[in-house]
Amino acid sequence: MTPTLDSRQLLAFATLARRGSFTQTAKDMFLTQSAVSHAIKALEREIGVVLFDRVGKTVRLTQAGEQLLQHAERILREMQDARTSLEELQNWGQSRLRVGASPTACQYLLPTVLREFKQSFPQCIIRIEPGDGPKMIELLRSNQIDLALMLKPDRLDEITFRPLFEDELRLLVAPMHPWAQKGKVVREEIADETLILYNKGSYTFRMVIDYFLHDKITLNNFIELGSMEAIKELVKIGLGAGVLAPWIARKELAEKSLISFPLGPRKLRRSWGVAFLKGRKLPLAEETFVGLCESVTENMD
């Protein structure tokens, strides 16, 4: 009978495949590099194939490694699901919810959703991991979060994405800004205007840059910040023009402390939703969370 693979070796293999570094893998697993190296060598001996090509201080999966990774990730997810199910049986009536969310969603969407959620699951242990899109995908892949409230990623290879709502990015300026005085945006002035944009590592930042490049407009001067509130405050004092979705500045637009204009002839729209790994059957708590997100964002734009 062929012996089964060691789960600890599979975990070391999957972590190394994701990290590409023995040093980072050792840190993630709280092991020494030699222990990780020994586990990988033992696994390669066990199955009789080379799983990684060593390139300097980094490693890359071989074709055999790529094939094994698909099975290893599924096995590890199922093992984690089994452990979670047993923990829930042991602590009847309790569960956990690990949610990743962009800083914008954390501030403007999650509080209402979680307030409703806690009424249905008062004993549920909730953990929130803030971060932008690329980080959310990494946390989902590494099973550090269950759900991610985020913008639709570029690729959905391993991800199921349930859409919630779409919004439009627009230019927001202070009432005394020249564009507000003229009642329109002067396209020829955009390249030299100070634009205040959201986090350079986010999907939103890339969308804005690509939008203007499509129109052959190169942004010569911009400020990037990780807080929507900070962006709004800088726009209010006349430091530049912000690029935001109107629902984030609903109060300011209503009191006319900010004025909104379209980015240009074409609308730049984003799709928000809840993401999770493909193939996962969501337990009741997670399905409830998704349903509450749908209800809270039903009239969002």
Image (cartoon, helix red, strand yellow):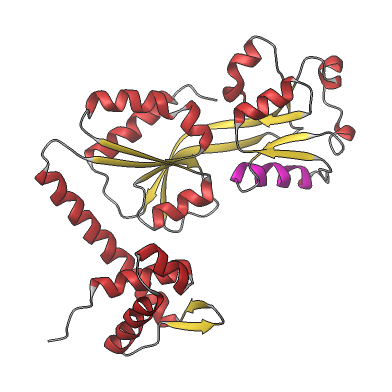
Q: Specify the quadrant of the image occupied by residue 226.
A: top right
Above or below residue 90? Residue 167 is above
Find out whether residue 292 is within the magenta segment: no
217 left or right of 57 in image:
right
Q: Is residue 241 above or below residue 146?
A: above
Tell me which corner region of the image, top left, top right, bottom left or bottom right, holds residue 65: bottom left
Which segment did they paint magenta?
A: 202-213
Percent across and percent down for residue 46 are 27, 87
Residue at coordinates 36% horizontally, 88% vertically from top-left?
49
Residue 172 visible somewhere in the drawing = no
- Of all residues, the one furthest to the right in this rendering is 188
Of all residues shown, which one is farthest toward the front? Answer: 32
Q: Residue at x 40, y 76 (%)?
A: 33
Report the residue at 53% width, 44% height from top: 132
Horizontal and vertical percent position of residue 202: 60, 45
**Dominant SS in magenta:** helix
Asked whether, in this view, residue 251 is left or right of residue 5, the answer is right
**Residue placed most toward the observer, 54 or 57:** 57
- In the depicted view, which residue is nearer to us: 65 or 11? 11
